[in-house]
Amino acid sequence: MNRVAWPFLLLPLLLLAVWAPPAASFCGFYVARGDAKIFNKASKVVLVRDDDRTVLTMANDFKGDPKEFAIVVPVPTVLQKGQIHVGDKAPIDHLDAYTAPRLVEYFDPDPCQVAYREEMRVAAPQAGMSKMSRDAARERSLGVRVEARYTVGEYDIVILSAKQSGGLETWLHENGYTIPRGASRVLAGYIKQDMKFFVAKVNLKEQAKLGFSYLRPIQVAFESPKFILPIRLGMVNADGPQELFVFALTKNGRVETTNYRTVRLPSDAEVPTFVKDEFSDFYRAMFTEQVRKERGEAVFLEYAWDMGWCDPCAADPLSAEELRQLGVWWVGSGETPRSGRAPSIMPGGAQPVFVTRLHVRYDRAHFPEDLVLQQTGDRSNFQGRFVIRHPWKGDAECRGAEDYRRQLRERRSREAETLSDLTGWPLDRIRRKMNLASDNSMPDDNLRWWDRIWAN
């Protein structure tokens, strides 16, 4: 049986360890990143936008038999075949890595040295009445019109318009798509907006011919003054909150939502060193806690940066070729970056693109509307970044060393409180894990004697 796998309800990812090889950076070492792989049911969408032009790339993380895959996406216009493309997943993964929240680490210098020496860091950066005629008659009776049919890559694509949701729902059923309960109400909302429906499923013969064992991203390009991301269909048959990562690539500046609050993720917080080995757990807990604090009604800004440079780079910046694969049509057109900042030397050269990474956890109760977006003129840079500082462990016998040890105790205590506030983890558990019993001279240390026996 065929099944509709909605564009923003994608099957769970295996939880992968978050690790990236340490690389020297400006004043520390990039050690880990919080990319989309650490979240289950995480969907990734790339939006390229300028004026009324949009290129939408949907990464379908579908796990299962390809013959069961299909998507239905509301689109503002009837798309011609040339407006549909099957892309490559690699640039999306690269963009995810490049914009991911990151953990950086620093090492305290010898406190007896007069000058504080910062470590260098490097960017881690039919017969008779033909079947066709019968189908057309049936479509008319349902108020459904097949505006176009294409085969693009391994996908069979149909563009539909409809007069009523019930007829559209019936058409989808009769053509092998299983529609979840509640879809009719949502479809009706899009029909009222005169939206069309982009329907795609896998052509197994074409897939075998092309030799791909996985589903490549589908891309569509269109012009419309509407700058929205339809998420409501993805919630119809959702069995819980969904994770969505939106990567917006624009000319002018940061992208934000207008019908929901866009909130910056906490950044530059110093956390205990043990977070290095538990960054996946930390990042999930931190994000969940921020969602809770915003009552589940916010969209989070994780990264906003002029791609003409980066500091530090969690991964190499995307090349002009990769950006063009994602639909950035103006790259290579001879335009120059608007930023007055002198770009650093990057592989592939500086690109006139501003990237925004948004992360939203949504469900029907808290996100009853599609995401309405706008491009702003704000080109200020932002990155979700967390810092660990390793204490000096060498010998130090000087007056400065005494001051350093006192400040270190205070710093470790602040790190524990910060981590608890960020994640909601119990403070006493964090303190035990940090072995703060060894810092028991702190005035606010209220651990009892037995807490100091087993520091775990």
Image (spheres, grey):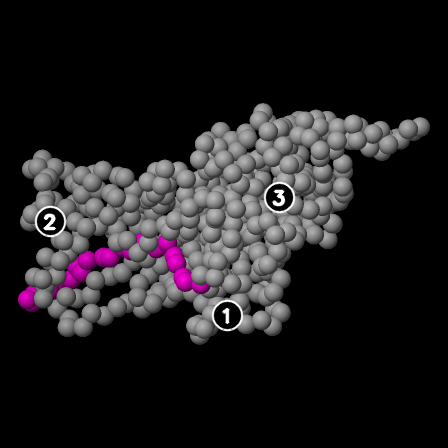
Near-viewer residue (133 or 318): 133
Which residue lies most toward the right here? 128
Disc with the residue nearer the chain's start (3 vs 2): 3
Query: If the image is split into quadrants, where does the C terminus sit?
Result: top left
Residues at marks 3 and 2 touching, judged by CB atoms closer than 8 Å: no
Q: Which residue is depicted at the point 61% across and 47% down?
A: 217
Disc with the residue nearer the chain's start (1 vs 3): 3
Secondary structure at badge 1 equals loop
Q: Position of residue 85 (x, y in %)?
A: 67, 51
Residues at marks 2 and 1 touching, judged by CB atoms closer than 8 Å: no
Q: Which residue is depicted at the point 33% across and 61% down?
A: 29
Residue 305 on the magenta segment: no
Q: CA distance from mark 3 to mark 2?
A: 54 Å
Amino acid type at circle 3 is: Leu
Magenta region: 379-399
Q: Which residue is depicted at the point 48% across and 48% down?
A: 258
Which residue position is annotated with label 1?
A: 338
Residues at marks 1 and 3 touching, judged by CB atoms closer than 8 Å: no
